[in-house]
Amino acid sequence: MSLPRRATLFGRLYHTPSWWTTTATTSWAVCLSRTYSSSSDIRSIVELPDRIHPRYLRSTKPGSSLLSLKWPRPPRNLLVVQKLYSETVTDAVVKFAKHIHNEYPDIHLILEPRVASSIQERVDFPVYSSDDRPYIAQKVDVIATFGGDGTVLRAASLFKLHGSVPPIVSFSMGTLGFLGEWDFQEHKKVWREVYMSGSDVAVRDAAVPRGNKDSPEEQDDGNNPWALIKGKSMGAQRASKVLLRHRIKADIFDANGDNINDRLSDNLLGDSKSLAGPLAGTLEPSPSLRAINEISVHRGSHPHLAIIDIFQNGHFLTETIADGILISTPTGSTAYSLSAGGPIVHPLVKSLLITPISPCSLSFRSLVLPLDTKVTLRMSKKNRGRELDLSIDGKRCAGVSPGSELRVEGEFVGRSHDGRGEEWAGGVPCVIRTEDDDPWVGGLNGLLKFNHPFGRATEGED
């Protein structure tokens, strides 16, 4: 039965006036139209073009420890990761999405499946959903996060099976802001610099309004992909600065010495068969698990302490009896490791930290080791058959049983083997401010109140 006929029959049965049937028919049709339009406006990430990999070049500024971001051509696929259950953050994401669509129409906006519908309802253009995780590493060019440090960690965790992470632009809108670089009020300026970083559009074009794609004189000649985005060039000297944050990677082996990475129950791993191989962006048959903050082994809900043997480069170091053990990066040194009594380490120091969690021995202090150190945590058989909790960046990954081993080492970060030593690779590239406004120092003073005097205010405070 057609929709008008069904509505007319409804009106006859209940003796409703003809104007009501017309209104009901129209409203029903509009409702159905919106429903089908909404579903079609959330598209799969599989449809997007392949990822564009930027280059990270050593800055020409003397004494600079940061890298310069250089795109070979404009990025097209932007993944947005937001703090959940916050109306303020959602409003900011909607505002950002509309700005991107209006000013950068060639960019495809990718959202997490759990928020895609709520965002799409408030915009009038299609968005893409990261519903197929094996394709994330193959499709995403750049990431923008809206939230606190946990949001940045969640974004990085999407690539924990992959050796290459897209650059991350983090807007601080959460409880902690140690990893959040930018205030949302700066989003237009920040995105312009990130998007144009590496562009060779002449500075003289900066005052020219954005071109019309449909006009013949504004057609891209193929040599300069940024030619259609005039008015946004900041000049070559304004390239975005990037800090490559080190990660650590881990492999899990059972008591028989077999690698069991692909058996882990972490829901972020999904189908291990689909994640392994070229489709996932990695050639490893059983890819290592990577963490930007820390990898921890903890006794969990068990009443007895965990017993773990620690090896350094194959040599027995010690047996620890504690609530657990943390292996952290310099970035993670201001997170769980700091709460457990570990030192504060600058993110550019190539190192990893071993920190015990509430050990029985007061002489077990945190250790700082070279990044290429191979650390093995062996679950002692003295644990009497019980599993210990394995977590990566605060998220429980699996249970590890007695006799199994966790083998951890730092992920390579450094100059590429291109013969010139200019280009760098590895780690998690985070777009940050320049050395003139060091966010790490600001985090120590503003968030951690480093060396804050008791009983009196510091300079600048009331």
Image (cartoon, rainbow, N blue to C red):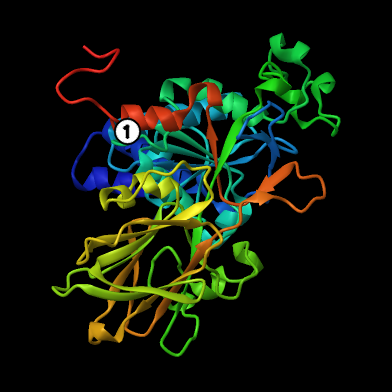
Q: Name the residue under label 1.
A: 23
Residue found at the far bottom of this picture: 256
Residue extending farthest to the top is: 207
Residue at image coords 32%, 64%: 325
Q: Where is residue 182 in the image (x, y as percent from the top left)?
A: 45, 27
* Crowdedness near tag 1: few (<14), some (14–19) or many (≥20) residues, C-alpha within 10 Å: few
Residue located 32% across and 51% down the image: 342
Q: In the displayed structure, does residue 109 sit left or right of residue 64? A: left
Residue 74 vs 374, above or below: the answer is above
For the view shown, which residue lies furthest in the front direction? 363
Is residue 173 visible in the rendered image? The answer is yes
**Numbered label tally:** 1
Dot 1: element: helix
Q: In this view, does 220 lie to the left or right of 453?
A: right
Quarter of the image that includes the C terminus: top left
Question: Residue at the location (49% across, 59% down)?
Answer: 248
Q: Position of residue 177 (x, y in %)?
A: 36, 34
- Which one is nearer the viewer's eye here, 231 or 306? 306
Q: Residue at x 53, y 21 (%)?
A: 436
Residue 181 visible from this viewpoint: no
Relative depth, front residue between 24 and 108? 108
Eyeballing the image, is 290 above or below 201?
below
Q: Where is residue 379 in the image (x, y as percent from the top left)?
A: 34, 79
| Residue 171 percent coordinates (x, y) | 43, 32
The part of the image, by quadrant, that contains residue 403 is: bottom left
User: What type is the residue that disc 1 sits on?
Assistant: Thr
**Front one among 188 and 310:** 310
Q: Quadrant of the N terminus?
A: bottom left
Q: Does residue 415 lie above or below 450 as drawn?
A: below
